[in-house]
């Protein structure tokens, strides 16, 4: 589930996030935060649906990463996922990218 | 001509029932002609409303609770009926960086009208989505 490219570590999540699997999502985010890399990407390209608990976990993880001088960004944000993120104003405190490549470019300074 | 509306109901006792309610919302919304995007968002409103009710009812020993779907010619309404006191659906529009407090924010954006009303010892969260907005 996690891939490394230099100092970047990516969690690719491929399921919609409901009360059925939100605990697994939390555990995956915790594992990502525990990685030694300080540039973290959550790739949600295959996700169409996320509940408020999952949104809270992303917000928590972004803030926890900052507290450890890391940066966590979210990639694959489009369609209904982008709409949900817009409703909860995620773009005001989280870096969001339509593709993982754009997130990698951001970390690479390109 | 007599106005006909269809009403469905489901009792929620455990989290597995919330998943069934989400499926039911998506199925009914699809049947009445909502776009797939709206079906998905109504499913989300169902999960948020039922999860809020479930957490409250579980904590206060008031399980089970009920959800109703009322389908009129021009409106799709979901009502979550639980025992207990009233609560507010008023939302601040500020940025929330915390882990909780986004459920009602989502619901108020998804549906066209959301309100709470008392009925005896019960409180009803009513969420209405107009079909004319399609």
Image (spheres, coloured by chain):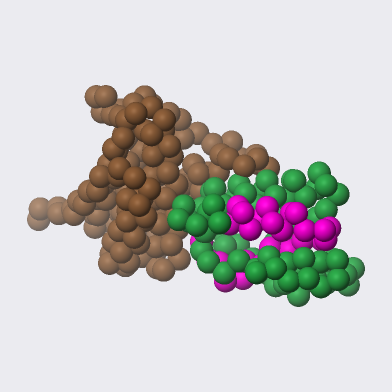
Quarter of the figure with residue A7: bottom right
Out of A92 and B19, give the one closest to the viewer: B19
Magenta part of the chain = A25-49
Point 83% across, 53% down: residue: A70
Out of B107 and A104, give the one closest to the viewer: A104
Quick one: which chain is green?
A
- Judge whether residue A45 is colored magenta: yes
Point 36% across, 24% down: residue: B85
- Judge whether residue B55 is colored magenta: no
Out of A31 and B105, give the one closest to the viewer: A31
Out of A16 and B26, give the one closest to the viewer: A16
Residue B11 in sight from this viewpoint: yes
The x and y percentages for residue A68 are 83, 47
- Side of A44 relative to B115 (left or right): right
Point 45% across, 66% down: residue: B37
**Considering only vertical position in the picture, is A92 above or below B120?**
below
Quarter of the figure with the N terminus of chain B:
bottom left
Point 40% across, 68% down: residue: B35
Q: Residue furthest left?
A: B1
The x and y percentages for residue A54 are 57, 52
The x and y percentages for residue A105 are 83, 72
User: What shade has chain B been given?
Assistant: brown
């Amino acid at each position: 589930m996690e891939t490394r490219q230099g100092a970047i570590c990516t969690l690719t999540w491929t399921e919609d996030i409901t009360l059925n699997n939100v605990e697994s999502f939390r555990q995956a985010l915790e594992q990502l935060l525990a990685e030694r890399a300080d540039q973290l990407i959550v790739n949600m390209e295959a996700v169409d649906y996320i509940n408020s608990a999952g949104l809270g976990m992303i917000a928590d993880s972004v803030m926890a990463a900052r507290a450890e001088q890391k940066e966590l960004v979210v990639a694959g944000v489009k369609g209904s996922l982008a709409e949900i993120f817009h409703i909860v104003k995620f773009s005001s405190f989280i870096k969001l990218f339509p593709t993982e490549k754009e997130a990698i470019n951001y970390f690479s300074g390109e | 001509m007599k106005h006909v509306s269809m009403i469905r109901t489901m009792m929620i006792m455990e989290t597995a029932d919330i998943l069934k309610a989400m499926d039911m919302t998506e199925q009914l919304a699809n049947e009445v002609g909502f776009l797939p995007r709206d079906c998905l968002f109504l499913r989300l409103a169902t999960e948020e409303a039922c999860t809020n009710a479930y957490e409250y009812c579980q904590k206060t020993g008031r399980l089970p609770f009920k959800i109703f779907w009322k389908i009129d010619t021009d409106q799709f309404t979901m009502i979550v009926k639980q025992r207990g006191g009233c609560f507010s659906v008023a939302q601040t529009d500020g940025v929330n960086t915390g882990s909780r407090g986004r459920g009602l924010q989502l619901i108020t954006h998804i549906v066209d009208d959301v309100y709470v009303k008392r009925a005896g010892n019960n409180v009803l969260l009513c969420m209405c989505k107009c079909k004319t907005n399609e």
